Amino acid sequence: MSDTAPKRSWFRPGGIILMLFVLGLFVWGNLSTRGASAWDSLCVAPPYISETMERFIYVKGLPFAFFAEHEWGGWPHREYLFWFPLLLNVAVCASAMASVARAWSVWSAGLGGKIRLQFHLSTAVILMFVAGLVLWANCAPSSQGGRLTPVIASGKVINAYFLSYRYYGWPLPVWEVDYSEGPREGPGNVQLNGPFRSNGEAAAHLVYDILACLTIVFFVGLACEAWIVWRARRNR
């Protein structure tokens, strides 16, 4: 048997550590509470994430929201739990773990068991684009249509303004900006501009966003290097 085709195993120690790290990020992200956005209406029925004058809506689930509730940090109740997006999240997590383990086994076997954290020039170019997309995702606002709030005087509605929300930070929101718009006046003043919910929760979300974004960049590089090793082995 040729020495150029070393035996590969999905259960190398490094691969297991990376799989557990990916699993931890998915569990953390799915248990975290965040503000509802327009993206969440794809999996959650709009009436469940539509805010009213009496309640704000928060959701759980990454990348797909599977729970909507008006209580911050509330535990999923049966009537507000959506099974299809929950199963999608589990499938995405399982696919990510399997992909990481496979890429790590191919890359490490291709290096003869000696792991060297180095990338080819082509991989570096791809990582520049991936890093740019990650930065854009954190700088671009995630918008949500708010609620129409009437202004009542003497028992009559004399005016109304519409509150809309913009969240900054991805995958979890870190900064929140609320805007008010009059029916005929155009954009109004900013009502709130500050950390999402509180300083502590915003800091926890910031740590998660940094870890998630660095993980995405690293795993894309790992996949590219594993592809290069696989092609080189096949050509031999």
Image (tube, rainbow, N blue to C red):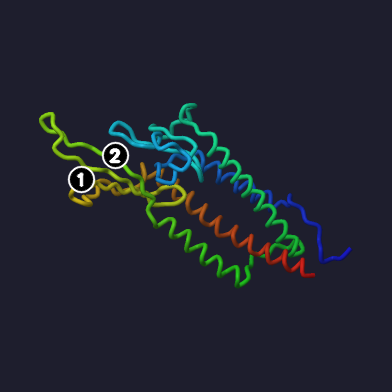
Residue 136 placement: quadrant: bottom left
Q: What element carries label 2?
A: strand
Residue 147: mark in rendering:
2
Badge count:
2
Depth order, front residue of 13/119: 119
Badge 1: residue crowd in 10 Å (few <14, some 14–19, many ≥20): few
Q: Position of residue 125 (x, y in %)?
A: 55, 70
* Residue highlighted by disc 1: 183
Q: Is mark 1 on a helix, strand or loop?
A: loop
Q: Where is residue 128 in the image (x, y as percent from the top left)?
A: 52, 67
Residue 58 placement: quadrant: top left
In the displayed structure, 58 sits above or below 132; it is above
In the displayed structure, 177 sits above or below 159; it is below
Q: Separation of disc 2 and disc 1 at Cα?
A: 13 Å
- Name, please, the residue furthest toward the left: 154
Q: Where is residue 54 in the image (x, y as percent from the top left)?
A: 30, 31
Type of amino acid at the residue the image marks with label 1: Pro
- Direction from residue 200 to residue 119 in the image, left or right: right
Task: Tell which circle, 2 or 1, labels the residue nearer the N-terminal end.
Answer: 2
Residue 152: mark in rendering:
none
